[in-house]
Image (tube, rainbow, N blue to C red):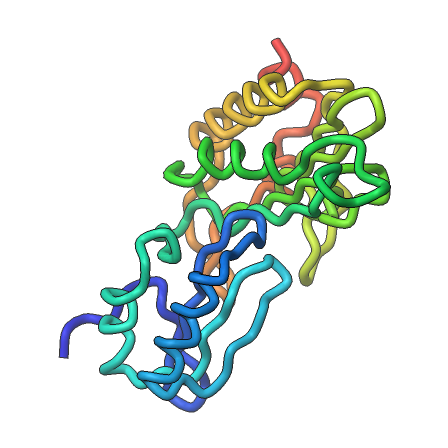
Amino acid sequence: MDKIHPRAIEQRDGSWAIKLKSTSGLVTPEYLEEVARVAKKYNVRQLKILTGQRFFLIGIKAEDVNKILEEISKDMGFNVEPSLHYVQACVGNTTCKYGTLDSLSLGKKIEELVYFEKVPAKLKIGVSGCTLNCAEAFVRDIGVFSGGKGWVLVIGGNSGRKPRIGDIVADELDDDQVLDIIKKFLKLYKEKGDYRVEGRYGMSERVARFVERLGIDAIKNEILA
C-alpha cells in the first residue's frame, strides 16, 4: 500500500479521517454532491462540520485515503501543515443585518495571501463583519473584525488548553492595510518563531506563545513601521 497522505489523521480504531477545505465555510451544491458521492462510494462512516467551517470525513479505510484524495476536486484539497489551518468568517454585510463590512471577501483575500506560507505552527484565522465578532477574532492566531470605522486587527489569540485573549495591534484599517500587516507579521513569525517540535502533541510554537515570548509591543514596532 502506498504511503498515506500526511494530512490524513489516524483515529483510535485504526481508521482514518480527512479534513476538506472550504473558503470561509462557503460551499456550492456541486461541492456537497462531491462530498456525498465520495462518502457513499467509500463507505465513509461519519461526516462532520468542524468549528473551522470544514467538512471532516471520519472512518475511512487506510487503503481508501489516497484514492479519495485523488478523486476529489482540487479546490476541496488542503495544504500540508504547518501552514494555514483555516480562515473562519461570518457572512458579513453581504446578508447579515448587523454586518458593516464584507468579511467573506476579506476572508478569501487572507486565505489567498496565507495559504502557501510555511510557518512554525498551524494558523487559525477569524474574520467578523461587526463587533459581535461571531468568528471569534480574539481567540484566533490572527483575528479581524469590523469596528465600525474599518477593520480591527488582533494577533495572538488562542483557545485550547492554554487560552489567551489576542492583542489589538491596529484599527480603522481597509482591506489592503490588513493584508499588508498580516504579511509583515507572517514574515516576522517565520524568521523568529520557534520551529522545534515539543510537548505531548508534538507542536511547534503557536502564535499566542510567540507573542508572549517576544512581547506585543516589540511585534507592533516591527509590523507597523
Name the residue located 71 percent from the left edge and 21 percent from the top edge: 217
* Furthest residue toward front: 29
Residue 103 in the figure: left or right of residue 204: right
* Furthest residue toward left: 1
| Image coordinates for residue 84, horizontal then vertical, percent | 47, 46
Is 186 above or below relative to 161?
above
| Image coordinates for residue 174, horizontal then vertical, percent | 67, 19
Name the residue located 70 percent from the left edge and 27 percent from the top edge: 216
Is 193 above or below relative to 70?
above
Residue 35 image-quadrant placement: bottom left
| Image coordinates for residue 181, horizontal then vertical, percent | 59, 21
Name the residue located 72 percent from the left edge and 24 percent from the top edge: 169
* Furthest residue toward top: 225
Count all numbered tags in the image, as a single digit.
0
State the residue in front, 98 or 182: 98
| Image coordinates for residue 56, horizontal then vertical, percent | 49, 70
Residue 137 image-quadrant placement: top right
Residue 220 in the figure: left or right of residue 87: right
Quarter of the image with the N terminus in it: bottom left
Quarter of the image with the C terminus in it: top right
State the residue in front, 137 or 42: 42
Name the residue located 64 percent from the left edge and 35 percent from the top edge: 211
State the residue in front, 49 or 191: 49
Is 56 above or below relative to 59?
above
Is 113 above or below relative to 176?
below
